[in-house]
Image (cartoon, grey):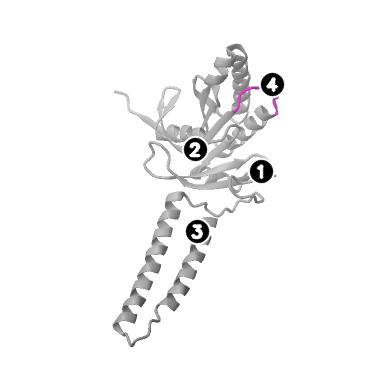
Amino acid sequence: MAQVQRKLTTILAADAESYSREMEANEVRTLEALRASRAVFQQFIERHHGRIANTAGDGLIAEFPSVVEAVQCAIEVQRELSADAQSGLKFRIGVHLGDVMVDGDDLLGEGVNLAARLQSMAEPGGILISGTVFDQVKDKLTLGFDYLGPQAVKNIASQVPIYRVLLTPDAAPAETVAAPSMTHKPMLGPATRRHRLYMSAATAGTFIALLFGINMLSWNGELWFQWPTLAILFVFCLRVIRLYRA
């Protein structure tokens, strides 16, 4: 058995939105749109020194020796397809820098799978990149990124930091309207918010119970623990507000 070859490379995964539905509506028109879109991908992939490693149906996998070239390619492809009023297809694109296995001209492994997962999570006409890609391009490309936080990705053991590429200077982040910036405050996921909420509630509850116990043990006919309790609840409410604005 031949030894498995591995390499570190940048993977671009692309797939057409609602391709099956478009084929059902008009096969000839959709096939023509797919061919035109593939020609655009081929043009820009070659321009940025990449190569197409695999095509299947309406999708493709390409690799690039340069992370910057891969992201720049993805941006130019989306802009070109968006400007083409004749195209009836919109593509999702995911880009990841990772380790892959080489099988002839084909690429396999977790690095390819992660790029494909990012593609499936992107919005039609959009681009998602992994944290490893962002680290390489953040100071080299003059555009903005929307940090979506660590995300659970199907069949990937650990959460993956994900960024959305802002394709136009006036594009707004997904959940907050702000000028594009390379420095982003992480957006907390639901699980993280719940965990922090439970921890804050447990801490507040512990202090309230402690105050009540002290009040009872030192009872002299006066009930006073409710006053510091109000202060604790006020601080807890402020933390909840900050938590859900993060």
Q: Nearer the viewer, mark 4 or mark 2?
A: 4
Of the residues under marks 4 and 2, which one precedes in the sequence?
4
Badge 2 amino acid: His
According to the image, label 4 marks what residue?
86
Label 4, label 2: how far apart the Cα atoms are: 30 Å
Q: Nearer the viewer, mark 2 or mark 1?
A: 1
Of the residues under marks 3 and 2, which one precedes in the sequence?
2
Badge 4 amino acid: Gln
Label 3, label 4: how far apart the Cα atoms are: 45 Å
| In the image: residue 153, left or right of residue 218 | right
According to the image, label 1 marks what residue?
171
Measured as percent of width and height from the top left, residue 232 is found at 45, 72
Of the residues under marks 3 and 4, which one precedes in the sequence?
4
According to the image, label 3 marks what residue?
243
State the predominant SS element of the stretch in magenta: loop
Label 2, label 1: how far apart the Cα atoms are: 22 Å
Badge 3 amino acid: Leu
According to the image, label 2 marks what residue?
96
